[in-house]
Image (tube, rainbow, N blue to C red):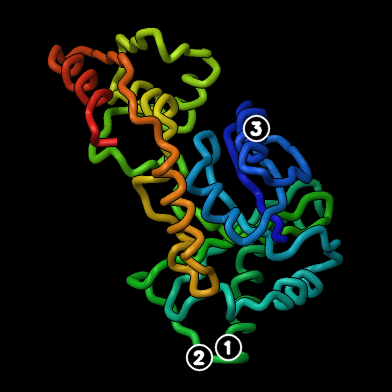
Amino acid sequence: MQNYVLTCELGLEALVKKEVLRQGYEITEVLDKAIYFRGWEEAMAVMNLWSRFGNRVFLELESEEKVIDFDHYFDLISEIEWGKYVNDWYVVRVKAKSIKSGLSSEPSLQSLAKKSIIKKIEKTREFFESENQGIVDIQILIQNDRLKVLLNTSGAGLFKRGYKTESVEAPLKENVAAAIVQISHWKYSENFYDPFCGSGTIAIEAVLIARNIAPGKFRRFAFQDFEFYNVRHHREALEKAKTGEYDRTYSVFASDIKADWNYLFSMFAFSDGF
């Protein structure tokens, strides 16, 4: 089994924990803005596809090693088989966060980690970076002098569902909108109204929840480009999700300052576009 981290907005931890448990994975730790869990390889695809309330799914590459100094830190990063996780020509992007730790300079942590990663890869092959190919996002977390190295498997935040082509000023994030619907305890047999809908995010998320449509159905994830990952897991998860959708309509109404939007979103909720 593998260790994963599903991050979220502060206050949504309980909802994220429930959706991890719903998929049958083992919760190992719950912290502010992060749910740690264990699952098999397919969990990477399943949780990216199904997390309505999370931000990103990370794969743990290194966990809980105590960091002594910068040299030790460099060596610990180098112990990871980076040639497996980084595709040729991909840009390696490292972000670091230090909390209550002796190694507190985050720019130094980022720079040293990238140097260590590139040096390890170049032991087995030539390595060049090109922004035209793609990006591998690495998150370094040192908390209480304990190191975690995380690989971003989602890419862009999971709130970016992929069903919108346009937005409005100061839009509501889709995962927050889904949480609002969830905690409203909407009874699907009743009408759902959003009279100040903006770009319609809450109404759309209500339809997705009511019809049991996977929120990641419309987008692409970073893990789909990982050479080490068997994308069969994503295909199987997507097919299973499609068969579990509810073929029903619901009365969802949304309107705003533009008079024609009420009609637009009412028809959208009833349409087969989802």
> Against 258, is 29 above or below?
below
Cα gap from disc 2 to disc 1, whole angstroms: 5 Å
Q: Quadrant of residue 16?
A: top right
Cα gap from disc 2 to disc 3, whole angstroms: 44 Å
Mark 3 lies on a secondary structure that is helix
Q: Which residue is mark 3?
A: 18
Mark 2 lies on a secondary structure that is loop
Image location of residue 251, percent across then percent down? 31, 14
Sort mark 2 into few (<14), some (14-19) or many (20+) by Cα contacts within 10 Å. few
Taking the spot 36% from the left edge, 72% from the top edge, the residue there is 133
**Camera sees residue 170:** no
Looking at the rendering, in which quadrant would you find the C terminus?
top left
Taking the spot 18% from the left edge, 18% from the top edge, the residue there is 261
Residue 166 got which mark? none
- Asked if the residues shown at circle 2 and circle 1 are in contact, with their CB atoms under 8 angstroms apart, the answer is yes
Frontmost of labels 1 and 3 is: 3
- Asked if the residues shown at circle 1 and circle 3 are in contact, with their CB atoms under 8 angstroms apart, the answer is no
Residue 126 got which mark? 2
Image location of residue 172, percent across then percent down? 40, 27
Amino acid type at image mark 2: Glu
Sort mark 3 into few (<14), some (14-19) or many (20+) by Cα contacts within 10 Å. few
> Against 206, is 25 above or below?
below
Taking the spot 47% from the left edge, 64% from the top edge, the residue there is 232
Q: Which residue is mark 1?
A: 122
Mark 1 lies on a secondary structure that is loop
**Camera sees residue 71:** yes
Q: Mark 3 or mark 2, which is nearer the start of the sequence?
A: 3
Amino acid type at image mark 1: Glu
Taking 41 as reference, is 78 left or right?
right
- Asked if the residues shown at circle 2 and circle 3 are in contact, with their CB atoms under 8 angstroms apart, the answer is no
Frontmost of labels 2 and 3 is: 3
Q: Quadrant of residue 117?
A: bottom right
